[in-house]
């Protein structure tokens, strides 16, 4: 089974690089770049979500914490594992991400091998999904 991964970020270069890495590892990857598309893509029920902590969307009302909280409060979506990836590594942000139900928190730039190993572990723990 190929893992379905959704990457939510406001940096198109990061999205494309991460998508290429995850596809190389055998995942089906979808990306959400614009503020108005993330919820529609989350509702497709991916196996895992990689989520940027700081999103510079025009409204200024949505950040990674808001998205995580929204997902975790929806009983149909709450079991989707979320892993934060952020250019801002702050211990308080990391602690808050875990308190909201996230599985992990990585700083950008991430170590590709470490990230893939962690995602495999999260997916195996969730439902025996794996990267091919």
Image: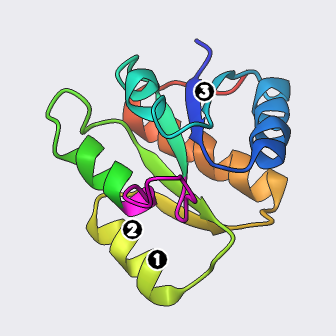
Q: CA distance from mark 1 to mark 3?
A: 25 Å
Is 131 drawn above or below residue 116 in the view shown? above
Find residue 14 and report its horizontal and vertical position in percent: 79, 48
Q: Residue 64 lies in what quarter of the image? A: bottom left
Circles 3 and 2, Cβ within 8 Å, touching? The answer is no
Circles 1 and 2, Cβ within 8 Å, touching? The answer is yes
SS class of the residue under badge 2? helix
Find residue 3 and report its horizontal and vertical position in percent: 58, 22
**Disc 3 marks which residue?**
130
SS majority, magenta: loop
Question: Which label's residue is closer to the chain start, 3 or 2?
Answer: 2
Q: CA distance from mark 1 to mark 2?
A: 5 Å
The magenta stretch spans residue 7: no
Query: Image check: 100 left or right of 24?
Result: left
SS class of the residue under badge 3? loop
User: In the rendered structure, which segment of residues is drawn in magenta?
Assistant: 52-65
View extreme (bottom): residue: 91
């Amino acid at each position: 089974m190929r893992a379905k991964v959704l990457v939510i970020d406001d940096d198109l270069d990061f999205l494309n690089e991460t998508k290429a890495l995850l596809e190389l590892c055998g995942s089906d990857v979808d990306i959400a770049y614009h503020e108005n598309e993330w919820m529609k893509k989350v509702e497709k029920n991916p196996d895992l979500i990689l989520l940027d902590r700081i999103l510079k969307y025009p409204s200024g009302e949505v950040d990674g914490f808001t998205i995580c909280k929204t997902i975790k409060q929806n009983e149909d979506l709450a079991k989707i594992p979320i892993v934060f990836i952020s250019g801002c590594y702050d211990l308080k942000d990391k602690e808050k991400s875990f308190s909201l139900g996230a599985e992990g928190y990585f700083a950008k730039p991430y170590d590709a091998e470490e990230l893939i190993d962690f995602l495999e572990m999260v997916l195996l723990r969730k439902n025996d999904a794996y990267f091919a």
